Image: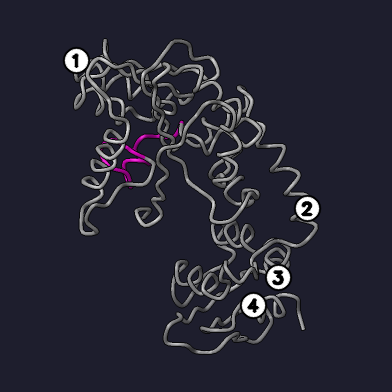
Amino acid sequence: MALIDLFLARAVKRGRLTLLRPDKPAKTFGAADPDFPDVTLRFADRAVAGRIVRNPATAAGELYMDGRMIVEDGDIMDLVRLLTANDKWEKGQNNLEPSWLVRSVGSVKHRVDRYNMERRSKRNVAHHYDLSARLYDLFLDADRQYSCAYYTDPDNTLEQAQQDKLAHIAAKLAIRPGMRVLDIGCGWGGLALYLHDKLGCEVVGVTLSEEQIKIARERAEAKGVADKVTFELIDYRRVQGQFDRIVSVGMFEHVGPPQYRTFLRKCRDLMTPDGVMLLHTIGRLGGPGITDDFTAKYIFPGGYNPALSEIVRGYEGLKFFPTDIEVLRVHYA
């Protein structure tokens, strides 16, 4: 039996996956189940099977993009649902993990990549954020907020949910008029402009993205608040001054575990004695780990979603006092 057959026989128990390969008869894996979709896959050439066996998740994504793995019945999301439903995280099966050799090499590479010093951080940000704004306009709200929204009502539009997210953040920070606020990883400026408009504070936004800061500055100028809401192209490690409030939304994923202590100590040094900080980050369901190959290669080079325990270790002994931890998983679309 071919290795791809052994792999799919283990990976698909419920639901039905039919595989079409060059010069081989069709083969079906699993069994029909009303709760699982039926999917038909076609491999365009003989090399596809070997690549999937060696590194299932990454190879499948690349082969699908290249048109060498074609979903003929159903669609790509049906395939994802079928495979993930058969590979429950809590059971610890990890059927989609790469081979031992690929996993070992990848683990070393990812741990090295997480040392996000200044030059590497700038390059990683450019890879993801210095793209045409037209791309982000296709799927983000008018402020181009790239972090999860906050759904006070599941029927709300994305625009409303993102505005509710901004209000939620503002309420947690307890900002008063005249306060100085630092926004680390300010994106296209939506949060900074909102905080000034609603609460009368002065905001400094910092980012490493040249495309983002250009648009953020244009927005502040257009609103006539460029003297109160300023944006700087600077690494967080080089920020100077004192701030009553610090907020960082969707940036911590780019810091990397080796730099957590550096980041949080810098934030503590920048805060006034009675300052407040809000940190919003994607989290990790389990304990510390590594970033999967596909995400590291194509989406977030140098990126890592932290476990809560890693964040806690980062601020221990820095005179930070956690007063609120909120998990926003149900709000993430």
The amino acid at mark 1 is Gly
From the image, tell me which residue sits under label 1.
224
Q: How many marks?
A: 4
Q: Tag 2: Cα neighbours inside 10 Å, few (<14), some, or many (≥20)?
A: few
What is the secondary structure assignment of the residue under circle 4? strand
Residues at discs 4 and 3 in contact (Cβ within 8 Å)? yes
Q: Choose the circle earlier in sequence order: 4 or 3.
A: 4
Q: Nearer the viewer, mark 1 or mark 3?
A: 1
Q: Is residue 258 left or right of residue 101?
A: left
How crowded pointer 1 is (Cα within 10 Å; few <14, some 14-19, many 20+) is rated as few
Residue position marked by numbered label 3 in the rendering: 46
Mark 4: few/some/many CA within 10 Å (<14, 14-19, 20+) = some
Instruction: Give the CA separation, mark 2 to mark 3.
Output: 26 Å
Task: Assess whether residue 135 is covered by the magenta stretch.
Answer: yes
Above or below: residue 310 compared with residue 239? below
Q: Is residue 52 magenta?
A: no
Q: Nearer the viewer, mark 2 or mark 3?
A: 2
Q: Position of residue 109 (x, y in %)?
A: 73, 43
Q: CA distance from mark 1 to mark 2?
A: 54 Å
Residue position marked by numbered label 4 in the rendering: 21
The label shown at residue 104 is 2
Residue sticking out furthest to the bottom: 32
Q: Quadrant of residue 74?
A: bottom left
The residue lying at 49 percent from left, 78 percent from top is 39
Q: Front-most of 198 and 156?
A: 198
Badge 2 or badge 3: first in the primary sequence:
3
Question: What residue appears at the point 60 percent right and 60 percent down from the top-left corner?
Answer: 63
For image coordinates 76% across by 79% down, the residue present is 2
